[in-house]
Amino acid sequence: MTSDLWALAAAIALASVQLTIASVLTLRQLGGEWVAAPRDAPREVTGLSGRFVRAHRNLLEIFPQFVAALFVVHAAHAVDQLTCIGAWTFVAARFLYVPAYAFAPPGVRPVCWLAAWAGIATILADLFW
């Protein structure tokens, strides 16, 4: 398996860990009755728990672009060093995004978000080189 696909596997693992953390924190804050209910009355978690939930949602928003970029580069048989660098940049940035969202001062989280997008752009750069 290529290094960029290992990065994809790492991103999937990160998403799974984030989902677990977000689910546990939601359960602890809102209670099992609400979590098990049909959720007709929406409620949001707040504070640190809410930050972990929103960090996971943000990953779910950008993850399809990451997967699509890898797919396009592989389909075009254009995988090279930039694909690997971009994929691992994405994973590292998304890994750092979680504590940045939860604990860092304002301004750190957007840098991690931009680094993840730069990783996707780097993957796609292999189509042109």
Image: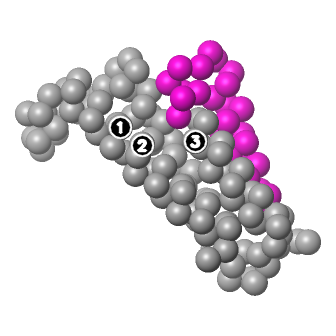
Residues tagged 1 and 3 counted as in contact (Cβ below 8 A): no
Q: How far apart are marks 1 and 3 (CA)?
A: 14 Å
User: Where 94 sits versus 80, above or below?
Assistant: above
The secondary structure type at the circle numbered 1 is: helix
The secondary structure type at the circle numbered 3 is: helix
User: Where 99 sits versus 116, above or below?
Assistant: above
Mark drawn on residue 95:
3
Depth order, front residue of 44/2? 2
Q: Quadrant of the C terminus?
A: bottom right
Mark drawn on residue 67:
none
The secondary structure type at the circle numbered 2 is: helix
At horizontal 35% and vertical 37% (from top left) the residue drawn is: 21
Depth order, front residue of 3/89? 3
User: Where 70 sits versus 18, above or below?
Assistant: below
- Residue 59 appears at what percent x and percent y? 51, 46
Magenta span of residues: 98-124
Residue picked out by circle 1 = 21
Query: In the image, 8: left or right of 23?
Result: right
- Residue 123 appears at what percent x and percent y? 75, 63
Q: How far apart are marks 3 and 2 (CA)?
A: 10 Å
Q: In the figure, residue 66 lies in which quadrant?
A: bottom right
- Indicate the amino acid at tag 1: Ile
- Residue 76 appears at what percent x and percent y? 74, 83
Q: In the figure, residue 79 lies in which quadrant?
A: bottom right
- Indicate the amino acid at tag 3: Phe
Predominant secondary structure in magenta? helix
The disc, 3 or 2, on the residue closer to the chain's N-terminal end is: 2
Q: Is residue 53 magenta?
A: no
Mark drawn on residue 18:
2
